Amino acid sequence: MILVTGGLGMIGAHTARALADLGHEVVVTSHRRSEVPSFLAGRVTVERLDVTDRDAFLALADRHDIGDIVHLAGGIPGEDPVRYFRTDTTGLLNALDAARAWGVRRFAVASSLGAYVGRSEIPWREELALPTTDLPHLIVAFKKAVEPLTTHALQGSGVQPVVLRIGTIWGPLVDPDSPFFHVPPYINAVLRGERPPPLHADDGGDCCYAPDAGRAIALLMTAKTLEHDTYNVSSGRPVANREFADALEAITPGLRLDLLPGRRNGPGEDPYLDIGRLTRDTGFTPEFDAAGAVADYVAWRAGNPR
């Protein structure tokens, strides 16, 4: 059985779905969210868990035979950064405690493409040394710190760490008004019958549809062997704003979206994650391009609020 903490969140739910599709038993944990998405209904076991409660976390093994852990549970920072760091660090350490106590095979943890911020090379590859630089958000700071905490905590334990440098993920269950990625609010405006503010046509960057991201993580958890302990998780190509606008127009009769020419900050490239290592070790390739992702998401939103 594979444990996915934060398994009713966007990335967690799609990871759980992909694991179930591969024939694995899955238990997901959730703290605040209780609604199980339709694509998981009857397919996974759901446990209510505050991951900061060590005893409750370890007690999961009294009810389930857990052989692998995907730790995706995490909070959103409030006004107090120390409180945020304390909460998410406590959850991580409890998950690592559980991995060691249960003797699981693999322990995967969410890092972020933001760990590469400060590198000028494009695309971003796992071999790049992570720079010391100011980071754009508290979440990125924590995710970057997660990497050495995890790999060092598991040294000598027999548990294989899998650091997931996760790209810009969107799709079913994303916050329609996400402050972290402009595409969900852009599409959401169209779904409300509004005209979204025009975007620069050639701006873009890293992007991956959530079902693809979940499948990538599932393949990393189930591969017979892995050659590395760190993997980029994304689509492997940049996506420009014009691709999203074209996709929306193609499925919305009469819709014409205004785009500004070129790029907001002039010529250049937007960073994105290279997934060559992921593909070599798991065979992963994304199933959704921008047009397919937009069509699938709009169909999903016809019956779902997020």
Image (cartoon, grey):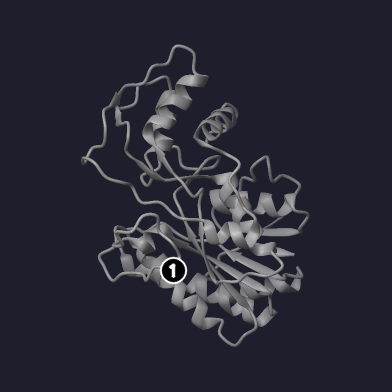
Which residue is denoted by mark 1 in the rendering?
Answer: 127
Classify mark 1: helix, strand or loop.
loop
x 49%, y 13%: residue: 253
Which class describes the residues within 10 Å of circle 1: few (<14), some (14-19), or many (20+)?
few
x 45%, y 77%: residue: 148
Q: Residue furthest top?
A: 254
Instruction: Give percent across and percent down for residue 126.
Output: 45, 65
Q: Nearer the viewer, residue 299 or 122?
A: 122
Q: Is residue 228 visible?
A: yes
Instruction: Give percent across and percent down for residue 193.
Output: 42, 19
Would residue 223 be found to the left or right of residue 275 on screen?
right
x 55%, y 45%: residue: 210
Quadrant that contains the N terminus: bottom right
Q: Quadrant of residue 108?
A: bottom right
- What amino acid type is highlighted by mark number 1? Glu
Would residue 97 be found to the left or right of residue 165 on screen?
right
Q: Is residue 87 above or below residue 209?
A: below
Q: Is residue 9 visible?
A: no
Q: Quadrant of residue 189?
A: top left
Q: Is residue 196 above or below residue 274?
A: above
Instruction: Give percent across and percent down for residue 254.
Output: 44, 11
Q: Residue furthest bottom?
A: 156
